[in-house]
Image: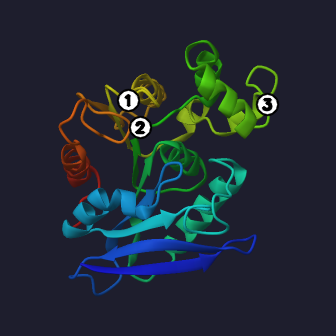
Amino acid sequence: MKKTTEHFETSDGITMYLQCFIPFHTKERGTATAIIVPGGMCSPEDYNWISGTLCRRGYLVYSMYQRGYGSGAPRVNDHAGKRQQQDLLEAFDFVVSQPLVDRDRVVVIGHSYGADMMQLLAVKRDFACGVAMSQLCDWLAYVRFSREFIPDYYKRACAKYGGDPFNNPEEYELRSTLKYADQIKMPILAISGDRDNITPAVWAEKMTKALNESGNTASKCVVVENAGHFFEHFGFHGDQRTEVAEIIMEWLAETMPAEP
């Protein structure tokens, strides 16, 4: 595979960078493409385990250096708010305009709040399918619950999002996807670990249930046993990223194979 760095200028004038993995066989337009949307404070290098696997299986891969973490001013972003949602929309439009990309065969793969951003993008743009890893579909409910159970997180969230979720719900609703389930028509694979204490698997199950009930029956949820938020194995025994990559690849082989 060949690895390059691509870039474009956002509507507010910052340079947005993307890591690109190009399969050796790619010579002309018509390549199935994956877009990787990182979670908070993460970079494309954190997802090389899935980017490399995708590329070796024949997918062209673009992975975002998100605002504040590889693009724009260091550590300056709005944590999946309006600006980062706009960044993803513009990155998507940039990727699908590239000459090697098959516009009809694009999968968007997000992790943590990147998974939520992927599903918010699915309301505004059409793509073949999506993968939501370790998602949180209802920020408002989650942060409200956290007041009693994770008080330190609750305080940080209130400071980060400009107020508490009881009196200032707008910023939390802005990041939530559950209410848009009936507007998401493409298949979504949700993957979470049953030991994820950051975004517990119940949120992936809730979102998938809502998608299924709204008629999107091709969407499914997989809960990985003994895996945490980053698919680290519970205990001192490494991680389960290889297992998760294979779950994704098996699903893509049925939903959007690299070779049409």
Disc 3 to disc 2: CB gap under 8 Å: no
The label number, if any, that marks residue 196 in the structure image: 1
Report crowding for label 1: few under 14, some 14 to 19, many 20 or more residues within 10 A (C-alpha).
many
| Tag in front: 1 or 2 | 1
Label 3 SS:
loop
Callout 3 amino acid? Gly
Residue kind at label 2, given as amino acid type: Ser
Residue lying at 48% horizontally and 45% vertically, measured from the top left: 115
Whether 65 is drawn above or below 47: the answer is below
The disc, 1 or 2, on the residue closer to the chain's N-terminal end is 2
First-in-chain label (1 vs 3): 3
Q: Residue furthest right?
A: 167
Are dots 1 and 2 in contact, CB under 8 Å? yes
Mark 3 burial class by Cα count in 10 Å: few <14, some 14-19, many 20+: some
Residue farthest to the front, as pictured: 236
Q: With respect to residue 57, does 190 lie above or below?
A: above
User: Is the residue 22 above or below the residue 167 in the image?
Assistant: below
Q: Residue 227: percent from the left, percent from the top?
A: 28, 33
Q: Is residue 198 left or right of residue 72?
A: left
Give the residue type that dot 1 points to: Asp
Q: Where residue 143 sits in the image (x, y, percent)? A: 62, 24
Q: Secondary structure at mark 1?
A: loop
Question: Vertical placement of 36 versus 163: above or below?
Answer: below
Residue corresponding to mark 3: 163
Q: Quadrant of residue 146?
A: top right
